[in-house]
Image: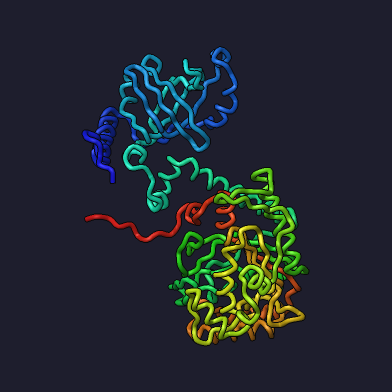
Amino acid sequence: MNKQKQNEPNESQVIQHRRQKAAFLTENNIPLFPNTFRKIDDIFKIVDNNDHLSGEELEELTTAHTLAGRIMALRSFGKVTFIHIQDHSARIQVFVQRDSVGRDNYQMFKKYDIGDIVGVKGTLFRTKTGELTVKADSVQLLAKSMRPLPEKYHGLKDVETRYRQRYVDLLVNPQARKIFTTRTRIVRHLRNFLDNKGFLEVETPMMQAIPGGATAKPFQTHHNALDMKLYLRVAPELYLKRLLVGGFEKVYEINRNFRNEGISTQHNPEFTMLEFYWAYVDFKDLMSITEEMFSTLAQSMFDSTKITYQGNTIDLTPPWTKLSFYESLEKIGGLSQEDYMSIEKASDLVKKLGDKVQTGEKLGKIQAKLFDILVEPKLVQPHFIYHYPTDISPLSRKNDNDPTITDRFELFITGREMANAFSELNDPVDQKTRFEDQVMEKEAGDDEAHFMDEDYVRALEYAMPPAGGEGIGIDRLVMLFTDSASIREVILFPLLRPEVTSG
């Protein structure tokens, strides 16, 4: 750690000094947190409408602007002070002169600090250096900042501090703000895309008596009034497919899911998914709509179907590469059928590659581990991997020609899964058998195995139309489109361990 410069105050001294200024303002009847000022102008609009004008043209204008923002820089020269204020849209310089705002008001203004939020009224001019500037007729304190912004002392270089104190990160880091405004644009595009194709947005329960829709370990909670155990949803799938039974043919939900699993640069226990279900189509139709969804998103964001992620150019131009699960093990993983079709050889290979195999684990799960190690990291450009083993696809329709595989695909880009889709299983007898197999796996110790859901089987007995369904990870999609290496960069408040405090 760098030694603090000699005579430079530490943060606690700065906070104490600010409290003294706040006390002075209060003693002089200046409220620290008033709610009487009404902002009229966004800084971006002021700059956008006037930045092309010369100094002479600005002098001819009589328009007074009423703006508000946080002081981000402050330079005082006795009777005049220059500040930069920042609102949600942009930053602009403000010129505060004692003769313009009045001697007493200027004396109070001198007690303002970087980080304070102020309201400003004034007209525009250009300084000698040509900078567009507001000449303040009045400056009002709107909120006093008791802590200094971080740049001067330690910055927000520690990533955990950035995530824990996201409010400060957003203040001082324009890239962080850009990521989250981009995230909103991405979600808006996805909604518009599906709405325009006739899909209906719906909402399904986040607390469920039986968690379903994915093989994942759920979080548990308890409802006191009903005295019953509940689970936070791991996926909305089974409820959305109930809606297909009920007569809706195109539905989607942008939802929060919760999985009691590990945390990494790609995983957060609370995450956002888009799931959509479409009657009378199969998984191949979903490949086409996914290509269209991603490529039009890129076109709208970057005016191109080629984007850059962590130094790699990712080409989202359709059509994308399509390989069956077993083809990928051979062509990309370098395995032969003898390697992956024998449970003994596949198990030994998994162990040699550093992973574990549980007693009684089915061949499909072992093959999936080989895929995760040998294939997935190499799928940088868009790849549809399809026809997964039935062992690891409890909700997917079996292939008509080969019941050991399912009509399912996963989309991989930049070496990670981006989407999971399949032709939906709508045979209630087959579905119940699959659930029973999952229950046996759960009883054998698999925390991620699926629960039995008798009501969902009953829903299928009323007949669900043939359909395709897909889930897309919004957080990973935002990572891709904002060139973010960690999922924590694209979640405003990611889950962190409790803060360790001294004392």
- Residue 175 image position (x, y, % from top left): 50, 43
Q: Residue drawn 54% across and 78% down?
A: 349
Q: Residue drawn 66% across and 65% down?
A: 470
Horizontal side, residue 92 vs residue 404: left or right = left
Horizontal side, residue 2 vs residue 492: left or right = left
- Residue 479 image position (x, y, % from top left): 55, 53
- Is 257 placed above or below 312 here? below
Horizontal side, residue 74 vs residue 410: left or right = left
The colour scheme applied to this rendered structure is rainbow
Q: Residue drawn 50% across and 62% down?
A: 267
Q: How many marks?
A: 0
Which of the two residues, 223 or 312, is positioned nearer the viewer here? 312
The quarter in which the C terminus is drawn is bottom left
Q: Quadrant of residue 143?
A: top left
Q: Residue drawn 43% across and 33% down?
A: 36
- Residue 444 image position (x, y, % from top left): 50, 86
Which of the two residues, 409 or 351, is positioned nearer the viewer here? 351
Q: Quadrant of residue 458?
A: bottom right
Residue 186 in view (yes/no): yes
Which of the two residues, 397 or 59, is positioned nearer the viewer here? 397
- Is 307 placed above or below 33 here? below
Residue 241 in view (yes/no): no
- Residue 351 image position (x, y, % from top left): 49, 78
